[in-house]
Amino acid sequence: MSSPVRTDISSVDIEVLLSEMTLAEKIGQMTQIEKGSITPEAVTEYFIGSVLSGGGGNPTPNTPENWAKMVRDFQEAALLTRLRIPLIYGVDAVHGHNNAKGAVIYPHNIGLGATRDADLVTRIAEATAEELLATGVHWDFAPAVSVPQDARWGRTYEGYSENTDIVIPLGVAYVKGLQQRGVLPSVKHFAADGGTSWGTTSKYDWLHGNWQLPGDGYSIDQGNAEVDEATLRAVHLPPYKAAIEAGAMNVMISFSSWQGLKMHAHKYLITDVLKGEFGFEGFVVSDWMAVSQLDRDYYTCVVKSINAGLDMVMVPFDYKNFIMTLTKAVEQGDVPMSRIDDAVRRILKVKQMLGLFEQPFGDDSLLNTFGSDAHRAIAREAVRKSLVLLKNEGNLLPLSKNATRILVAGEAANNIGMQCGGWTIDWQGSSGAITAGTNIVAGVKKMVGEDTAVEYHTEGFATADVTDIGIVVVGELPYSEGMGDKSDLTLPQADVELINKMRATCKKLVVVVMSGRPLVITPLLEQADAFVMAWLPGSEADGISDVLFGDYPFTGKLSYSLPRTAADVPLKAMKANANGELFPVGYGLTTEV
């Protein structure tokens, strides 16, 4: 005989609730599914603990209101279960609520690292949390506390710095900002995802996935960190320990390996170090379909990962097979019931901490401030503080607002998609006016006086058309994860030719580079009178003009070393070469206001 439907769940002790749960209800809590692979009805039927939107997992049409409805529908379905345990909805809001159109898109972490401003990062996290809660989302798969050691990695821009001491305070600041607004941060990707070696990513003939693609894609992402434990503990683990000490209650495991063993099977690091030595009391979640990489036999994958210490599995598609497999593993004694209870206890504890039992929904009133001017002001401030000035010959910057004529060139000068980079509206991002925001050309026009002519052309101007001031904006097209792994860290030839063309057209030339990683820019420096690294600034490009024209000073400092040549990548190669560093971490010129 089944138990009656509980109506007083908010007052129930977690241990009492756990004692009343069936095995099916427990395994349901351990299951996370992508929203396109499950219906609200199935959430009820299988007692599902979490639903997520992957990159591009958006409602149609993609509006904040539709986001709120989509998430509410899944939550209401969870509350129809016997014990009325709420689910927790997760998204990759890695630089704002970046899947949702109209959200404010902040600079990627590589830019925030250049600010060295923990208070700013906290405010960004708080504003992001408000936009998440407006749509009912209580779980943010951020911050990444990676410490990238090889700029060829397509996720370099998700790391604040190559330097652990810079990563720690900014990662902690983001954790605190989300938590203060009632959103669960997911500290990722445990561990050493930024320490993998080029060419070590495994192929899986039993799985279909992007890592099977030819070319540079997935050459280092999801690869093997071939470092000793002393390096692991000195470089890659400290940001997790600091985040846990700051109260972090969720950690996402990395696709990558350490010394040849996949992190999703690494019981020593997950159970002994993270949960034991570091005292982590929250729950551990897998990455996207990552457990399926452990073995061609799915049963083995599930047993290994759960016994290693995973508490929730981002399946994300075939949840029925996962539930059936884990159920069988428990019934056959290959996964002990104590491990299941530990996992579910951790998940329920976090849901209780977030107040989901009392208030499982978001805050619809926050829809009024979604994408607000106040949030955009924070993003614009972040852009200003993230810009790094590498060269300023003759104190060209700040530019005069009363110049007679300014020529602006480059597709990137009028392209919000390029400004934002990957993880924007779609997983890989895309070019063009993909969401609300401001571009560089418009920002320049707003800055100058009525008598200044601002002319723009993507491909530059004829050499005979010489003028005093030119601004050329170049950079990387959007990418994310292993799709962005790239052996050649020079700018495309078309960008080089555009810079050369503008050099011949302008007496004084400002070069602005938008990039998700350090690039080899040595040959381009001599072509520019002023050279600015703008990273991936997000939706509020007016912050660039604020600094170019002197309303605010340049203050950003490199959080990554810039290589002199391609031979100076990865970082260990640069450190081995006395002349390998073009600009060191901490470099950045300042200007007067």
Image (cartoon, rainbow, N blue to C red):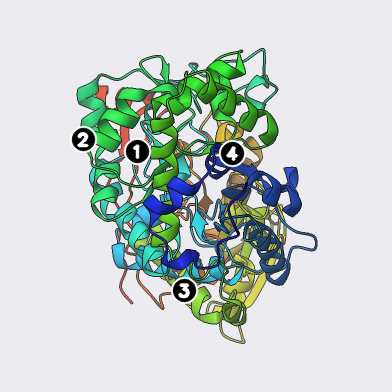
Mark 2–mark 4 Cα distance, whole angstroms, equals 31 Å
Looking at the rendered structure, the secondary structure element under dot 1 is loop
- At a point 54% along the width and 69% down the height, the residue shown is 133
Amino acid under disc 4: Ala
Closest to the observer, 148 or 323 = 323
Q: Earlier in the sequence, mark 2 or mark 1?
A: 1
Q: Is residue 536 above or below residue 500?
A: below
Identified by mark 1, the residue type is Val
Other residues around mark 4 within 10 Å, as few (<14) / some (14–19) / many (≥20)? some
Q: Is residue 553 left or right of residue 102?
A: left
Looking at the figure, which quarter contains the C terminus? bottom left
131 up-or-down from 412: above or below: below
Where disc 2 sits, the SS reads: helix
The residue that disc 4 covers is 24
Look at mark 1 in the image and give the residue it sits on. Answer: 147
Q: 260 or 485: which is nearer to us? A: 260
> Mark 1 packing: few (<14 Cα in 10 Å), some, or many (20+)?
many
Q: Disc 2 designates what residue? A: 277
